[in-house]
Image: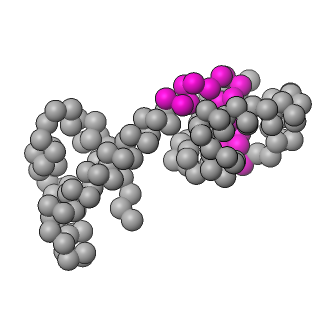
Amino acid sequence: MFLLTDRLKRLLQRLKGEDTARVFLKDTEMVMQIKRVAEQLGRSEDEILEDLMKAGMNSFAMHEEAVKRWDSLTRREQEVVALVCLGQRNYEIADILAIEPGTVKAHLQNIFTKYDLRSRRELRLALQNWDFASWWAKHQP
């Protein structure tokens, strides 16, 4: 599976109205990568470019949606999400935030509803590329 690189993310952000192929062709390193992938998979460069664009736009849209949902959380819910994604259990989160474990559970239910998820595992997967260690260091209660 092709992972969306930072370079591709920047290119996608610059798109805004430009022809997709032109944006990629401006970056010779990206063109070389596309050629290598096309050769390895025995497909045309145009097919690879189209697949990359679809994957990139999907990833970009998913990231934007995750940010929008993050912004809908209360400060306390954000703290709970960060701690869940850092591997803390409910009782540990309760201890760190000086709240009751039942309150943590209630926050998690609200978070799951806002993210349209059903479990801690799904939450961690949805936000797996977010740097919660740095966020937590800046936002400790």
Nearer to the camera, 134 or 44: 44
Q: Position of residue 114 (x, y in %)?
A: 61, 32
In the rendered view, does 93 fall on the left or right side of 2? right
Q: Position of residue 102 (x, y in %)?
A: 87, 34
Q: Main secondary structure of the magenta part?
A: helix
Q: Quadrant of residue 9?
A: top left
Q: Is residue 79 visible?
A: no
**Quadrant location of the C terminus in the rendered image:** top right
Residue depicted at 46% across the width and 35% down the height:
65
Does residue 75 belong to the magenta stretch? Answer: yes
In the rendered view, does 82 fall on the left or right side of 49? right
Q: Quadrant of residue 2?
A: bottom left
Residue depicted at 32% across the width and 45% down the height:
57
Q: Position of residue 89 (x, y in %)?
A: 80, 46
Residue depicted at 71% across the width and 43% down the height:
84
Q: Is residue 125 above or below residue 133?
A: below
In the rendered view, does 24 fall on the left or right side of 139? left
**Quadrant location of the N terminus in the rendered image:** bottom left
- Region of the chain picked out in magenta, as a range: 68-87
Q: Is residue 6 above or below residue 2?
A: above
Does residue 2 belong to the magenta stretch? Answer: no
